[in-house]
Image (cartoon, rainbow, N blue to C red):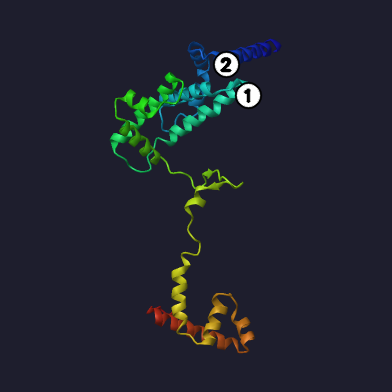
């Protein structure tokens, strides 16, 4: 047990030293060695997402790209292990790939096919150049115009809708704002506008006493007994007037209601 623990610690120290050397020298051979040594992480994570509609080979390729990104972004001086940093980076790439598999808005097949090539070219160029490729780099690699690459990148934004909960930094204010705040939301009372207009027109046919009974009964939700006591009349009177109010409404709306 102690021997295995010691071997594990030695391995961690070796990996840490290799990343320190890579940060200092930028040695491509060392970078490739680190990628090869940690391919098992990509393999394990890719297998977690099989049987979800995407072939394992595609998932493994995406996971490997995520591993490359993790290698390039890892800062050994932060103190945490590489595997702890690489895992969420790789998983994020896999989830993004799942998300990008579907188009929310149908675009020409030409754009869909070119979009796949642009994404692959972007990933491979990032590995080769050790930086994010420019639009010109991608256009040169694919043998297409810069305008076509830009058109494809713009079209790719319709892969998935943006969440209304997406937050943005609000400069000048401590509170973050979300997309829903920026575009507005439907007023909860919007649907009541037409209804209230109809009610206003209907109540024009009522006298003052009938209006009072109508609002007491259907807005304040009061009982006939309660209304009768306040108006100092019998419940029978309130019942009779309520039926008269309903009859006036039916006549105004020209609605025939079968008597039950």
For this orientation, the residue located farthest to the right is 2
The structure residue drawn at horizontal position 53% and vertical position 28%, both measured from the top left corner, is 89
The structure residue drawn at horizontal position 56% and vertical position 85%, both measured from the top left corner, is 238
- Image quarter where the N terminus lies is top right
Is 185 placed left or right of 15 in the picture? left
Residue 99 x %, y %: 44, 36
Residue 118 x %, y %: 36, 29
- Please tell me which residue lies in front, 67 or 6: 67
| Residue beneath disc 2 | 19
Calculate the distance from the C-alpha at mark 2 to the C-alpha at mark 1: 12 Å
Numbered-mark total: 2
Kindly identify which numbered label has been placed on residue 78.
1
- Above or below, 100 relative to 32: below
Secondary structure under tag 1 reads helix
Q: Residues within 10 Å of mark 2 (few under 14, many from 20)?
A: many
The structure residue drawn at horizontal position 55% and vertical position 82%, both measured from the top left corner, is 213
Q: Residues within 10 Å of mark 1 (few under 14, many from 20)?
A: few
Q: Is residue 22 in view?
A: yes
- Please tell me which residue lies in front, 185 or 38: 185
- Please tell me which residue lies in front, 258 or 34: 34
- Above or below, 5 relative to 108: above
């Amino acid at each position: 047990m102690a021997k295995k623990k010691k071997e594990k610690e030695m391995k961690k120290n070796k990996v840490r030293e290799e990343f320190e050397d890579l940060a200092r020298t930028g040695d491509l051979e060392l970078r490739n060695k680190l990628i090869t040594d940690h391919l098992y992480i990509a393999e394990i994570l890719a297998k977690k997402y099989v049987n979800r509609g995407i072939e394992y080979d595609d998932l493994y390729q995406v996971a490997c790209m995520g591993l490359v990104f993790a290698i390039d972004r890892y800062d050994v001086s932060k103190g945490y292990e590489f595997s702890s940093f690489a895992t969420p980076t790789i998983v994020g790439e896999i989830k993004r790939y799942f998300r990008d598999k579907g188009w929310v808005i149908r675009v020409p097949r030409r754009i869909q096919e070119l979009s796949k090539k642009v994404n692959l070219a972007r990933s491979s160029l990032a590995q080769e150049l050790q930086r994010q490729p420019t639009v010109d780099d991608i256009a040169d690699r694919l043998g297409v115009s810069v305008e076509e690459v830009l058109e494809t990148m713009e079209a790719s934004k319709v892969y998935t809708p943006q969440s209304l909960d997406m937050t943005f930094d609000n400069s000048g204010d401590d509170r973050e704002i979300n997309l829903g705040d920026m575009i507005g939301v439907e007023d909860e009372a919007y649907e009541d506008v037409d209804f209230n207009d109809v009610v206003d027109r209907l109540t024009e046919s009522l006298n003052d006493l009938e209006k009072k009974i109508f609002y007491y009964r259907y807005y304040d939700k009061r009982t006939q007994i309660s209304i009768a006591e306040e108006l100092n009349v019998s419940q029978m009177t309130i019942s009779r007037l309520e039926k008269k109010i309903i009859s006036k409404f039916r006549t105004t709306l020209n609605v025939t209601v079968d008597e039950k």
